[in-house]
Image (cartoon, rainbow, N blue to C red):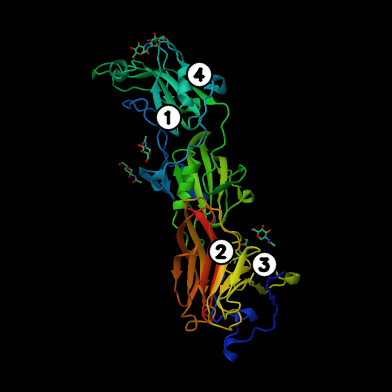
Amino acid sequence: MLFLTRLLAFSTLAVSVAECGLVYPAYQGVPATTNDAYNFNGTSTNSDSITSTALQVDQKSGVTTELLPNLPPANTTVTAVDGSLLNATIPASRRTVALPLKRKVSRRSSSEYELVFWGTGTDSDDRDASIVGTAYLTYTLVNNSTYNIQDCLEFCDNTPGCVFVNLYYEMNNHLLDHVFSEHSNLKCATYGDIHTAQEKLNFGGQSLSGDPNGPLTYIQQSAGWSSKSLSDPFTPDGYDPLAPLDGANEAPGYMGFVFLSKYDVAACAAECNARDPDPVGGSCKYFNIWRATVYGVPTTYTCAMYYIPADPSTAINYGQGNLKVTDSRGYVRKSYVLDGGFENLTCPNSGPFCLTTTTDTWLGSSPEGGDYDATIFHYTEYAHSGHGVALLGSAYGEDSLPGTLTSASVLYTEPGKTYIIEFFHSSYYSGGLAERDAFVEVYWNGNRVGALHPGYSLWQYYHFTAVGTGSDKLYFVGGAAPSYDFIDDVSVMQT
Ligand SMILES: *[C@@H]1O[C@H](CO)[C@@H](O)[C@H](O)[C@H]1NC(C)=O
Ligand SMILES: *[C@@H]1O[C@H](CO)[C@@H](O)[C@H](O)[C@H]1NC(C)=O
Ligand SMILES: *[C@@H]1O[C@H](CO)[C@@H](O)[C@H](O)[C@H]1NC(C)=O
Ligand SMILES: *[C@@H]1O[C@H](CO)[C@@H](O)[C@H](O)[C@H]1NC(C)=O
Ligand SMILES: *[C@@H]1O[C@H](CO)[C@@H](O)[C@H](O)[C@H]1NC(C)=O
Ligand SMILES: *[C@@H]1O[C@H](CO)[C@@H](O)[C@H](O)[C@H]1NC(C)=O
């Protein structure tokens, strides 16, 4: 093969910088200054904060008496951010275009619903209560010449996200009796979560008859039906789902959480995409969405975000006290670049140190007259994380020309979507003065989409954006030995 791979494993060649000048990276030199490896201990999920916030948040509702029927279903909103309750709820969709719907909208027959609880009946002294619960969507008034279960379930079928209905009579409300065109007191309320009789909390008792001294409202025959089968949520664009998790993740690289008004995977993905990058860990690369119940009652929907993708082995938080973790799912944000951590290179005999210009996943090339100006190293001491790292600048110190590091395969993006290109960079190898010309330029299909001229720098996070064409070429140009630029942990993700 034509691969120009000069694998080296000189462990004895690292001599003191002071003694005879710089030992070049290819000879396993010791950097002039050091950057202690960052340790992610202590960056785990703050479950206590999630639990205590879940015990305070109140996002339960039902049909308020003056509300018009047949409004569009309520949008998902954020009800808490990192332990602070939000009073004015912010639409979760604020930073994205229309969110895909959570559940498939397909017509279901009433045989696809099951009764969750029955009502009191409609005798003159029967009194009941309607549901006050999470994930309220909208309501309608169904023809009340019969107790019209069929029309109510059909309304649920046609309401995106609906998995539960509460059907009940509301008496002595003049809006129903005289104002709304339906002339029906039979309310059909839809929800995005399943509720039980213990959530029958609205007993009426309001003065809405139109006469201040008139009779108060009351509820009769309040029954609930739920969909028998809940389809899996749609996987949001740019993510890969894990298999459903047993509990919530307790994992490092935790970035914080929001509570959502509904179990809305797409809204959680939008929160992850919009989360400010962590200076040490970079962008959100994983989210864990789960439903909290307190004494069995759905209470809130947690969206926890991480810059290190978590996995099922850490899904070990099943709840605390009366709070239970249910319906936990994890989604990993896809990176469209292969082997962004340069971990693909292994050394002969599993040695700790080697370098090359070519791996399965990256190609280093030099301009005319240059040699080894872009290389991939397997060496923990140089890496930001793991063993692998890329270097721009002549590895043997033979020239001061910039090298080009190219992703070996094109990136199969989605045309028209915006991508974040992020990576970590350092230029401290040769010390303060010698690193003054350090630079990296980022190219996307030949267009320069970013550049940095940091001079001497410890590991730092950078990100740029580019628009996908469906088949994109990513490369980095930089280094001017002895100004060396190291690059590691490259990710390209949909925004
Ligand atoms: C991080 O935590 C692990 C497990 O508790 C421990 O083995 C390791 O030594 C810690 N690392 C550092 C740098 O503290
Ligand atoms: C939901 O959000 C969309 C887009 O922001 C907006 O047009 C619509 O009015 C909202 N619907 C409700 C019920 O608030
Ligand atoms: C929310 O609003 C209520 C009533 O206006 C106020 O008493 C409370 O302090 C507010 N809470 C927060 C977190 O802003
Ligand atoms: C309700 O249904 C009955 C029986 O089908 C029908 O006669 C009546 O016109 C309907 N009322 C309304 C308001 O549609
Ligand atoms: C239907 O609702 C209307 C309006 O509230 C009410 O006047 C009427 O008595 C109800 N009919 C039945 C059969 O409950
Ligand atoms: C290199 O990376 C590619 C893509 O991530 C992977 O398929 C391949 O197995 C890797 N090879 C080695 C030797 O790690």
Residue at 57%, 20% in the rendered image: 111
Marks 1/3 in contact by CB < 8 Å: the verdict is no
Q: Residues within 10 Å of mark 2 (few under 14, many from 20)?
A: many
Is any atom of residue 314 visible in this view?
yes
> If you read the primary sequence from the N terminus, does the residue marked by circle 3 or circle 2 appear first?
3
**Front-most of 3 and 356?**
3
* Residue type, mark 3 in image: Leu
Within 8 Å of ligand 3, the CB of disc 1?
Answer: no
User: Dot 4: what SS?
Assistant: loop
Residue at 58%, 83% in the rendered image: 397
The residue identified by callout 2 is 489
Q: Residue furthest right?
A: 349
- Residue 467 higher or lower than 387, as above or below: above
The residue identified by callout 4 is 118
- Residue 445 higher or lower than 261, as above or below: below
* Residue type, mark 1 in image: Val
Left or right: residue 38 compared with residue 179: right
User: Dot 1: what SS?
Assistant: loop
Q: Residues within 10 Å of mark 4 (few under 14, many from 20)?
A: some
Quarter containing ligand 5?
A: top left
Which of the two marks, 4 or 3, is nearer to us in this view? 3
* Residue type, mark 4 in image: Trp
CA–CA distance in space, label 4 to label 3: 64 Å
Which of the two marks, 4 or 2, is nearer to us in this view? 2
Residue at 46%, 80% in the rendered image: 436
> If you read the primary sequence from the N terminus, does the residue marked by circle 1 or circle 3 appear first?
1
Marks 1/2 in contact by CB < 8 Å: the verdict is no
